[in-house]
Image: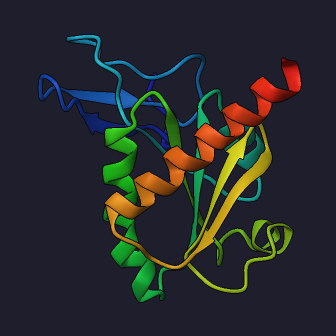
Amino acid sequence: MADETDRVTTCRNCGRNNRVPAVGEGRPRCGNCGAELPWIADAGDQDFAEIAEQAEPIALVDLWAAWCGPCRKVSPALEEVAGQMAGQVKLVKVDIDAAPRLAQRFDVHAVPTLLLLDHGEVIGRQAGAAPAAALRQWVEETIASRRGARATAHG
């Protein structure tokens, strides 16, 4: 049964539309060809923990506002990164005007503010808009340094 938080995502591999829930086990895959799908969800004060903090891949959180020009500029770039990194990140979009507790919790003074969360722990933070290539590089480098730190701690 479809939920109002589900998004329809087009598979980059075969072009089929797939319904992707905001919350779920594992990582979304195309029902037609099995390719990993971009996982993009909206979250607010009430459901952020379930959608972002409990996400299995790293959560790329976009704290944005409807009145913010740079936020509108960076949104397509973030969705591009989510598509390129399908299976590795979950893009979670938070409208700070609708989620003031999250804006306060993450000490947001400028939008867009981007966070990388690993099971609720902030492992990366960046303010301002950037092109998709720069955003992807930031995400990849942050994830790689996180994995490196884990390997050192366990080795």
Question: Does residue 2 appear left or right of residue 119 in this picture?
Answer: left
Can residue 47 be seen? Answer: no
Looking at the picture, tell me which residue is in the foreground, 120 or 134. Answer: 134
Question: Does residue 80 appear left or right of residue 92 in this picture?
Answer: left
Q: How many marks are shown on the rendered structure?
A: 0
Q: Position of residue 30 (x, y in %)?
A: 29, 18
Please tell me which residue is depicted at 61% across the width and 69% down the height of the picture.
126
Q: Quadrant of the C terminus?
A: top right
Q: Position of residue 8 (x, y in %)?
A: 31, 38
Can residue 105 be seen? Answer: yes
Please tell me which residue is depicted at 75% across the width and 73% down the height of the picture.
103
Quadrant in the rendering for residue 120? top right
| Display colour scheme | rainbow
Q: Position of residue 2 (x, y in %)?
A: 44, 29
Looking at the picture, tell me which residue is in the foreground, 20 or 139. Answer: 139
Please tell me which residue is depicted at 77% across the width and 65% down the height of the picture.
102
Is 70 located above or below residue 142 in the figure?
Answer: below
Q: Position of residue 138 (x, y in %)?
A: 51, 56
Looking at the picture, tell me which residue is in the foreground, 43 or 38. Answer: 38
Question: Does residue 9 appear left or right of residue 26 in this picture?
Answer: left
Quadrant in the rendering for residue 63? bottom right
